[in-house]
Image (tube, rainbow, N blue to C red):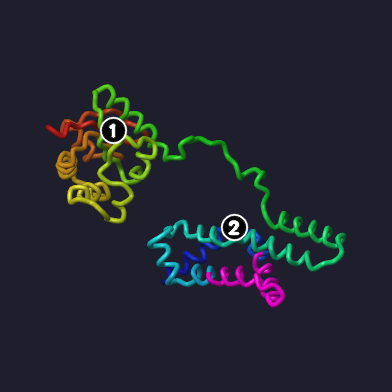
Amino acid sequence: MQKTWTTVLEMFEKYTNGSWHIILLAVALLYLLLTVKKKKENIIFIVFSLLFAGLYLCPYTADLIMKNFIGRSVYWRMFWILPSILIIAYAGALFLSRLRSKGVQAVLLAVMVAVIGVTGTCVYFQGHYTAKTDLYKLPSPTVSVCKLIKADAAEQGIEDVYVVVPNHLVCYIRQYDASFYMPYGRNAFRREDLTQTQAGIFSQMSSDEADAETINHLLREEGINYFVWDRTGQTRDDFDAMGYVVVGDVKGHRVYRLDPAD
């Protein structure tokens, strides 16, 4: 639970990122609580915010959510379901509506807008936008590897590409080209819905002591015709010695073609 609690605090800091808007949210909720007798609708925002805080902060519910829903590294996304902007705007509008003078309302509205602007960050400032270097938003080797395989398959008259790639590319290959067949996807990381052969391939691809002979046997058993390897040394030499056809090298990744019938 200590690890979960640490993650909860880290994700809170990552979400707020030095912004004072969380303070504005707290002030807005406090005002809604103080005026709840006069405005019964306030209870909706108050109860929802309390429930959210309980779910987010409680290590047991946080651990459950991290493991089964959104993941530990992006737990800050929980704040997406908290209507912070709506609550701040509603509380501000409710406060202004209780004032009779239109002039005072206008002045305080300007002050509120200024406070929101000052406590936030202008999205047009430098640093929020950078020149896009990857139009596909995929890890850099992905597109190059797929293009290399696709070109070779067309040249060799191979209609169906069955490919195994290093684990860091598993979730991205089919995002670029959905025509590629793969023995597993994200499910492999959860050890779900895998045949014995597929589990064996994933285990070898995950191991620091992968065995070329074992990988070769499993690839051919699964009917793989393209294989991508990103490590140098003896294992790569073993694949070369087994008759794997080197299609090309891309950013530290060697692409092989193999005939499962051999």
What amino acid type is highlighted by mark number 1? Answer: Val
**Residue 232 in view in this figure:** no
Pick the front one: 71 or 145: 71
Left or right relative to 178: residue 194: left
What amino acid type is highlighted by mark number 2? Answer: Asn
Q: Magenta stretch: give its range.
A: 25-51
Residue at the spot x=68%, y=67% of the render?
Answer: 28
Q: Which residue is mark 1?
A: 255
Left or right relative to 50: residue 4: left
Task: Say if the magenta span includes residue 260.
Answer: no
Q: Is the C terminus in the top left, top right, bottom left or bottom right quadrant?
A: top left
Pick the front one: 163 or 48: 48
Mark 2: few, some, or many residues within 10 Å (few <14, many ≥20)? few
Q: Which residue is mark 2?
A: 17
**What x and y, as percent, mark residue 4?**
44, 67
Q: Is the N terminus in the top left, top right, bottom left or bottom right quadrant?
A: bottom left
